[in-house]
Amino acid sequence: MLEELHLFGVYLPAALVWAVIAGVSAHVLRGLFQRWTWFKLFGPAGVLELALFALLWLGLTVVADAFFNQGA
Amino acid sequence: MIKQWTMAMVRTLATALAIAALLFAVHALWLRYQVEPVTRDGKVVADIVPVATDVAGLVTQVCVHDNQTVQQGQVLLVIDPSRYSLALQQAQANVGNLRASLAQAVREDRRNRSMTNVVASEVIEQGQTKVEQLRMALAQAVAARDLAQLNLDRTVIRAPVSGQVANMTLQPGIYMTVGKAALALVDTPSLRVEGYFEETKLQRIHVGDAVSVHLMGVSGTLRGHVQSIASAIEDRERTGDVARLANVNPAFTWVRLAQRIPVRVVIDYVPAGIRLVPGQTATVVVHSPDAKQDLWSW
């Protein structure tokens, strides 16, 4: 499990880093998706963005836990 | 009309799907970060033995240097033995003196008792008392001699355990008082990891569970297993001694943090090239048998 990330001498909790990446990615993806008509199927756009954020956060966590070695 | 109804249904279903995905992800994240027994608050720990002098005096010899590995019984430092050698000689002379006096008193007593017709009973009794007194005085002197010998032996300070010398700044010529710590000895065989787990995660930790340990900034994983869980921690809301009435702090807090419970982890495997230093920060992951299935069981 990857619990922390070493960034320029500072050890950050991995959960925080993944959350920030997921949040930014979800926001960018929402902008892209809004160009497509099928996006209107989801009703409130915030719901999809929130779901995207949580899924991306979980995805990043699972991938990091599986492939990255702690302390690397 | 039908098309509008169909669109509304699709929109509702799609939104419900998004909400379901959101709830699933939040639940999985909650399990991963709040329930699974993982902590970044771990430390490499070893028992530290503070080595103190049992007799006072000047340090004449320092036989070890900082961070040196020593074996149990190895000489660490020597206190000036001159005063204690003289005290031993004095005690030995005192023992000899009393032995001679006792031998003389015994002879006199034996002679007096063999001539009861010419020696008064009072004199015989006095002789016997003198013998008893001298026997006791001799026992006292022997104890004093043994104590002097013990003090002399204690001028040589030996390592009580095998380990590594730490924080050693002692130099010859420094005066040591009785009980003053001279140096610290790290009991290397007692090296272990202690993970400070939130109390909410304790139910998932069992004695014998496999553990992975990651040291801060060090690549590679140490393996171990849970040896024990702390039997008690201090109640910070309550003060007072055992024999006094309870004094409980009447604090009320909206937000409370989970307390940390130390979990002791025995190290089974250390990858080559990794050096363990007591005090190092470690991330401790307990591989609880029921953790993984719970993540996806929702």
Image (tube, rainbow, N blue to C red):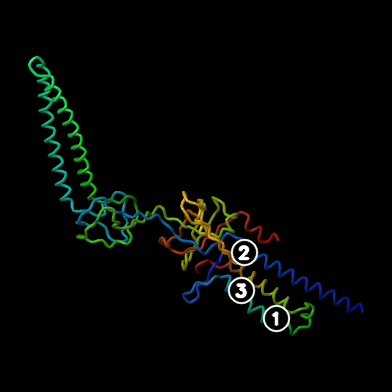
Instruction: State which tag comes first along the sequence, 3 or 1.
Output: 3
Q: Residue A54: x percent and y percent?
A: 67, 72
* On screen, residue B18 above or below B179: below
Q: Are marks 2 and 1 in contact (CB under 8 Å)?
A: no
Residue displayed at 72% across by 69% down? B21
Q: What residue does disc 2 label?
A: B32
Label 3 and label 2: CA atoms lie apart by 13 Å
Classify residue B14 by image quadrant: bottom right
Residue visible at 13% across and 32% down in the picture: B99
Q: Amino acid at mark 3?
A: Ala
> x, y percentage for residue B251?
56, 63
Q: Of the residues shown, which amino acid type is indicated by label 2?
A: Arg
- The quadrant of the image that shows the C terminus of chain B is bottom right
Q: Nearer the viewer, residue A23 or B174?
A: B174
Where residue A50 sits in the image (x, y, percent)? Answer: 69, 75
Kind of residue at badge 1: Arg
Disc count in the image? 3
Mark 1 highlights which residue?
A30
- Mark 1 chain: A
- Few, some or many C-alpha atoms within 10 Å of disc 2 (few <14, some 14-19, many ≥20)? many
Instruction: Please state if B296 lies on the left or on the right of A9 as rendered.
Output: right
Contact, mark 3 vs mark 1 (Cβ under 8 Å): no
Q: CA distance from mark 2 to mark 1?
A: 26 Å
